[in-house]
Amino acid sequence: MRTNGDRERGGGLAAAAIGIAALGVGELIAATRGDSLIDAIGRVMTDTAPVPVVETTVALSGKHDKVVTRIGVGAGAVAATVGLGALSDRARTPAVAAFGAAAAALGLRRPTRSPATVTGAAAAAGVLGIGLRRRPRGLFGALVSAGAGAGLLAAARALNRDYDRRQHEAINRVGPMGGISVVPQDGLEDEPGLSSLITANRSFYVADVNLSPPRIDPARWRLAVTGRVAHPLRLSLSELAADAVEFDAVMVCVHNRPGERRAGNGRWYGVPLATVLEHAIPETGATRLVTRAVDGYTISLPVEPLRCGEWPGYVVIGVNGAPLAPEHGFPARVFVPGLYGQYTGAKWLAELELTDDSHIDYWWKRGWPSEPMWVTPQARIDVATPGRAAAGSTSIAGVAWAPPHGVDGVELRIDGGDWRPVDLGTETAPAAWRRWRTTVDLPAGEHTLQARAISCSGEVQDGTARSPFPSGPSGFHTLTIKI
């Protein structure tokens, strides 16, 4: 004889299966136009979640934050379906309608306003309404519904992968963007395990609020320079490439805690913002340069230091000899070496708008400071290998950065003792990272290593441990080794 508890568990399982099926239907319909209902919901979660939630997610999930967000969306949708299933028939109908309307609004909320996402949300709501009225019977019925939903999700992913493939083919047709004719060397090429002097494109960290990058046709794309300018511009990739230059610089995420790898050193290819502003001719009152992505996301910068060259900003269209990858902002992004990635400029650039100080950026609304945040000196230990150089010795090596001024020195401290200088590799550019290494003799046992960087401007790395929000991370990279 089945108890009320058995029926409730069975009802919850059936509702969960309906939730997976409904999500699969919505995702597949959205995928027919290369969009994603899950990603649309995930973006709203990112946009509206309290800062402590965002910071905790970033800290715990690391580079897997987008996967974690997608899993959270799926789990939330299934949990919501179970909750809807527990309502009475009379209350469930308006609740499902409201649920579908909210999901559809997500599609309209996005600047792309994808009709497929809206249709997918409406279809998912329809499946929820019908499915919760005629729930699958028994465990077998629930498994069939859940399996069908999983199959639809897999089909949607396959469709989106096909759109991704077409985007990569379009990017490949663009051709090289700059190039490294001579591979830079700094004299530390023989140190195993040490980070590359130039970070490979596939190894560059990814950080943004989008779960998937927008797909942009390079042939049709134009960068608009608008607002308070005497000469508005519309620039193609080829027109930007005509004025592009190469420069070496490290890019650092504001969430990069000591020892983490949310930093990469590249040879970038881009047009100086001073050149763009010279052609556009800012008018009186143009105090802010708003960098706007195709999805409406904005980061703004003060005009004057960019115009006079005090801040060497660029419209970047390539890195390490290739066009930007989709996840790194293809076809263009703004980069000001020395500013944290969250402040340096938008990816998937669509517009540069010159305006006054009334503009409010995305992150300012979330509680981050409005003034640009500069990267502070930081050293990282990549290698601590006992016995490599000679018996009884330990090789210690890593990278350090202090853009835009450059690294003047790196020091190592062992077991809380005095700071001692280490050997530096040759500097490729002040804004780039600099590799370092040393060899020390250590007795048997456990030892604590700490490294700090000193910039050419005299700034010494702050050893006080501090979280990224709201003024950037600090502290020493600390590593414990056993000899």
Image: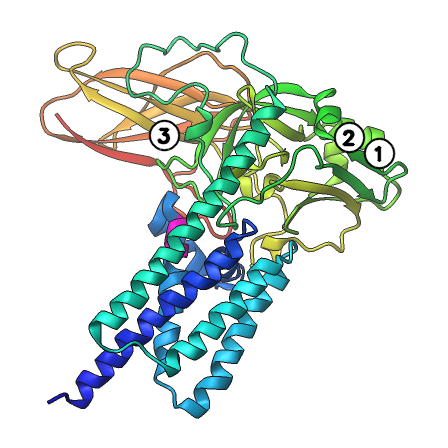
User: Please, what is the three-letter code of the amino acid marked with disc 2?
Assistant: Val
Is residue 137 at all visible to an observer of this figure?
A: yes
Q: Is residue 54 left or right of residue 422?
A: right
* Residue depth check, mark 3 versus mark 2: number of the one nearer the observer: 2
* Residue located at (45% from left, 9% from top): 185
Q: Is residue 245 above or below residue 283?
A: above
Residue 69 is covered by the magenta coloring: yes
Residue 373 is covered by the magenta coloring: no
The reply to whether discs 3 and 2 touch (Cβ–Cβ < 8 Å) is: no
The reply to whether discs 1 and 2 touch (Cβ–Cβ < 8 Å) is: yes
Which mark, residue 276?
Answer: 2
Quarter containing the C terminus: top left
Residue beneath disc 1:
280
Q: Give the structural element (helix, strand or loop) at label 2.
A: helix
Q: Position of residue 377 (x, y in %)?
A: 47, 32
Residue beneath disc 3:
380
The local crowd at label 3, few if under 14, some if 14 to 19, many if 20 or more residues have their Cα within 10 Å, is many
* Residue depth check, mark 3 versus mark 1: number of the one nearer the observer: 1
Q: Give the structural element (helix, strand or loop) at label 1.
A: helix
Is residue 76 at all visible to an observer of this figure?
A: no
User: Please, what is the three-letter code of the amino acid marked with disc 1?
Assistant: Ala
Q: Position of residue 273 (x, y in %)?
A: 72, 30
* Residue located at (42% from left, 41% from top): 474
* Residue located at (85% from left, 38% from top): 232
- Report the span colored magenta: 65-70
Mark 3 vs 1, N-terminal side: 1
Looking at the picture, tell me which residue is in the foreground, 196 or 414: 196
Mark 3 vs 2, N-terminal side: 2
Q: Is residue 273 above or below residue 117?
A: above
Q: Is residue 209 above or below residue 382?
A: below
Q: Position of residue 163 (x, y in %)?
A: 52, 42
